[in-house]
Image (cartoon, rainbow, N blue to C red):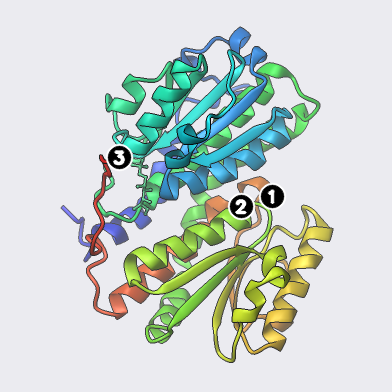
Amino acid sequence: EKGGYDYFMLKEIAEQPKAVADTLLGRIGTDGRLTLDELRISDADLRQVDKVVIVACGTAFHAGMIAKYAIEHWTRIPCEVEVASEFRYRDPIMGPGTLVIAISQSGETMDTLMALRHAREQGAKVLAICNTNGSTIPRESDAVLYTHAGPEVAVASTKAFLTQLVACYLVALYLGQVRGTKWGDEILAVIKELGDAPTLIEQVLETMEPVRELARGLADARSVLFLGRHVGFPVALEGALKLKELAYMHAEGFAAGELKHGPIALIEEGLPVAVVVPTHRGCTVLHDKIVSNIQEIRARGARTIVIAEEGDEAVVPYADHLIRTPATPTLLQPLVSTVPLQVFACELATAKGHEVDQPRNLAKSVTVE
Ligand code: M6R
């Protein structure tokens, strides 16, 4: 049942191109526009949305953080994202124009379920993004957009995460499409690029041997830091979470701009620091800033592991290890930049002799608050 792989996690990482393709299937029309008839929220209602609030836990929360960048950019609707366990206890402000998006692979996460119940009690509409047909979260929501990752068995989420990203992009792009924002042309171009994502993910998977070798060499490291900017920031958090879960190792993700506000004090000789570099063709100011962040940490002794898109030459002089990902539109980059971090964590944990499918203390579905 592991399809020839030693672990479900390896199988599920390898299945990502198909999972993403299946999640896109039937949702991009021949005219290049999106059709999400299954949504059960009318276009008229979507035009009335004045605020989006995303609730989720763990890896799904990281997908939500990335969705915020996409939703605000393409739709100009203010978007908040919050860990589900914090949401209802702070008396959040919602109204009839609030669209709450609850993201969950299992559809049974109690924290997320309680957050969406609270949202509905306050009069908000809830859209679930879920991978499990007929589970509690979609049943209790006003609408659902299913991800088609197929069953995810390994406790550490991989293919579910990439498909959650796809679903979030679809919602963001669809909101932009029905509301006719000034980004109309960009939206059409991105829909097209989204269709190419399975091929790009496949390309990344084919080039992972150096990442595995690097991970094996770091099995004795005490700590690994992850830095990112823009959508690379949630990707950094996700890379750190994977390493904590699987390798039981101290790992921390930071927004690279926060370095100087404290975390730079952690940098010492030989400390591995992975840096997720935003696309260099997107925002050059942002890109320049992360290049100087890499210089700063390297000057203080960090061993830099740089994840950057093909053609980005500015990072080369400061990368002790360079991991290339194919070029994508800025907001879609997490679809490719997350994959090396999944492989890295899985390989490092295996090198330490850990059982990656069933990490200690964790359950696949967390049904208690
Ligand atoms: O089933 P859900 O997507 O609601 O689960 C949320 C988290 O418990 C889950 O993503 C968890 O963080 C994973 N173990 C991460 O790999």
SS for callout 3: loop
| Above-or-below relation of 330 to 280 | above
Q: Is residue 8 above or below residue 193?
A: below
Q: Position of residue 314 (x, y in %)?
A: 77, 73
Residue that badge 1 annotates = 330
Q: Residues within 10 Å of mark 2 (few under 14, many from 20)?
A: many
Disc 1 to disc 3, how far (Cα)?
27 Å
In this rendered view, identify the residue nearer to me: 23 or 63: 63
Instruction: Find out whether the residues at labels 1 and 3 contact each other: C-beta distance under 8 Å.
Output: no
Q: Is residue 285 left or right of residue 316?
A: right
Q: Earlier in the sequence, mark 1 or mark 3?
A: 3
User: Residue at label 2?
Assistant: 333
Q: Tell me if label 1 and label 2 are in contact, CB under 8 Å.
A: yes
Q: CA distance from mark 1 to mark 2?
A: 6 Å
Horizontal side, residue 266 vs residue 164: left or right: right
Q: At label 3, which amino acid type do we have?
A: Gly
Type of residue at label 2?
A: Gln
State the residue in front, 313 or 143. 143
**For mark 3, what is the residue?**
150
Where residue 199 appears, x then y in whole percent? 51, 50
